[in-house]
Amino acid sequence: MSAMLLKKEKWPEFVEKLAGKKLWAPGADGDAMRFAPVTEGETPALDFNNTRVPPKEALFPQTETMYRFQLGAEEMEEPQLEDETVLLGVRPCDARAMTIVEKLFRWDIDDPYYVKRRELVTVVGLACSDPGLNCFCTSVGGGPASTEGLDLLMVDLGDNYLLEALTEKGETLLESAGDLLEKADSDAVKEKEKLVLEAEKKIKREVKTEGVPEGLPGLWEDPLWQNVSASCLGCGTCTYLCPTCHCFDIQDETEGFESRRCRMWDSCMFGEYTLHTSGHNPRPTRRERTRNRISHKYSYYVDKFDVIACVGCGRCINLCPVNIDIVEILKKVEEAL
Amino acid sequence: MKTNGNPYIPHTATVEETWFETYGERCIKTFKVVFDDQEVRENWSHQPGQCAMIGVLGAGESMISISCSPTEGKFLRFSVMRMGKVTQALHQLEPGDKMMVRGPYGNSFPVDEWQGKKILTIGGGIGQAPLRPIVEYVRANLDQYEGLTMIYGARTSGDLCFKGEFEEMESCSDLSCHLTIDVEEEDWSGNVGFVPQMLLDLNPSPENTIAITCGPPIMIRFVLENLKKLGFSDEQIYTTLENRMKCGIGKCGRCNAGGMYVCKDGPVFSYAVLKEIPEAFA
């Protein structure tokens, strides 16, 4: 597919060309960055590390209406999902996460909400030149310029962005901004390769996954689970901010006679998540919940979908209030195997 | 089937009949329901062991075992214990009211594979609800099976579900029905004692037999132990699991036991599969 160059000063014009589509890009949300719809005339800045909240909410909103109804009536009205959306500045790990989660949402029965949003979205990625302290994407099948899940990859070359279309959607987007772009020469491509290599070298954290998917169930009663979960508060941050966590709750909300059935992010780190109505809980403590979180990502998901459900973005490490570190947990798993 | 493409949208059904199986705080009410839409009604097909998400708009949905066999007719039956928000709302429903139903979900008991075998069901309390479809299915196809033995227990005689149906069974020579309650009661002529012990006392031969059990986790654990003592192989033992569920189609995440989703990979598991899942009896 074609590689083009965009001069950085033409970035605002490039964004203008996308007018008419819904744009989502990283923006400041308090002291953190979070993907949010771009308002008209605004030019999203791309000089950020990764966002605190992953862009998964563009496809899987934190709370979404499944259908509306009137109390006492039987008609159910589904929301119309028809806005074409462009996600700008998605890091390669988060784009990979979308393809991983999509496997589940398309497993046997399609989840209509996720699948529709996925079809309507064009994902414009931004390669990482300066990975974070706790990034470990290269250990779990990704990389600073991995293209999985992306329609278009942007690489910051200093004065220019290198734009590589990866899918038809990406090509279409490039065509629509054709007059702003120049064809990238081989020097630009070489420069990109050099940048990517340098970025890879900056990734210091590593997990070893060999033997882990098959070995995890055998560590069921290992004392490591007690050790790694002892300080856990059960706050759920690790799962809410995880780009591959996809669990949800379904609840009915009513105001007057107007009702909706909606779904919202849920977390396997909460006791209520598995609590039976009888009071029995198959995962009564944070030990079992932590064991499930790790086993789900590194074993069950691999069994079902042949891919680890962790992209190494490091958010759960960066933002855990008690410094629980998934890389350390996996180190203990490896030692115990 | 008519689903308008969205698997989360339930079908409307009308409650035709309701009755109480048990009374008290955690009473169990049975609902016989029929889909309103003719196409849905005609195309619906379920197998013994499957479940459905049933609910009331505005209150929510719960995964409940379909407690009738498809051989009984073009209707569904659910026996629901009044426990939480959704089941309380369901208990308000009376004949003529609307119930929302989507499904059927999960795998089913391999009743075709079991042809030519003796069927032994071992149930406790509300755990009889998913076993009832097997009992009814075998009764309707008695020529294909070598008979059916049913062991069923509850805390008190008042906690036994489907009582009226057992008397009928006792008059048929291919069927035997053994009831037990945990503590002695006046006017109770049946067995007194726990279900796992009654299983040992009856001493059924494992030869050409399939044993299916469902009940409280503690009962299942001891029933499995005792079935092994009686010489049943792992492949001859089946159970059906339950876990908290929201979606019913393997998306919402919560019902997994190890790597298995109870809603899709289950709820029916053979012990041969189950014993490899460390979380299965948690």
Image: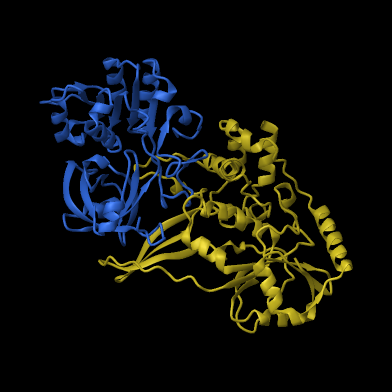
Chain colours: A yellow, B blue
Extreme right residue here? A187
Q: Is A177 above or below relative to B44?
A: below
Q: Number of labelled discs?
A: 0
User: Residue B237 in the image: x percent, y percent?
Assistant: 39, 26
For this rendering, which residue is in front, B259 or A304?
Answer: A304
Task: Determine the image quadrant of residue A172.
Answer: bottom right
User: Residue B184 in the image: x percent, y percent?
Assistant: 18, 24
The structure residue drawn at horizontal position 25% and vertical position 58%, both measured from the top left corner, is: B38
Extreme left residue here? B187
User: Residue A167 in the image: x percent, y percent?
Assistant: 67, 65
Extreme front residue here? B143
The structure residue drawn at horizontal position 42% and vertical position 41%, both measured from the top left corner, is: A281
Q: Is residue B281 left or right of residue A13?
A: left
The structure residue drawn at horizontal position 46% and vertical position 27%, both measured from the top left corner, is: B272
Task: Determine the image quadrant of residue A70.
Answer: bottom left
Tell me the quarter of the image containing the N terminus of chain A: bottom right
Q: Is A127 above or below relative to A301?
A: below
Q: Is A157 above or below relative to A112?
A: below
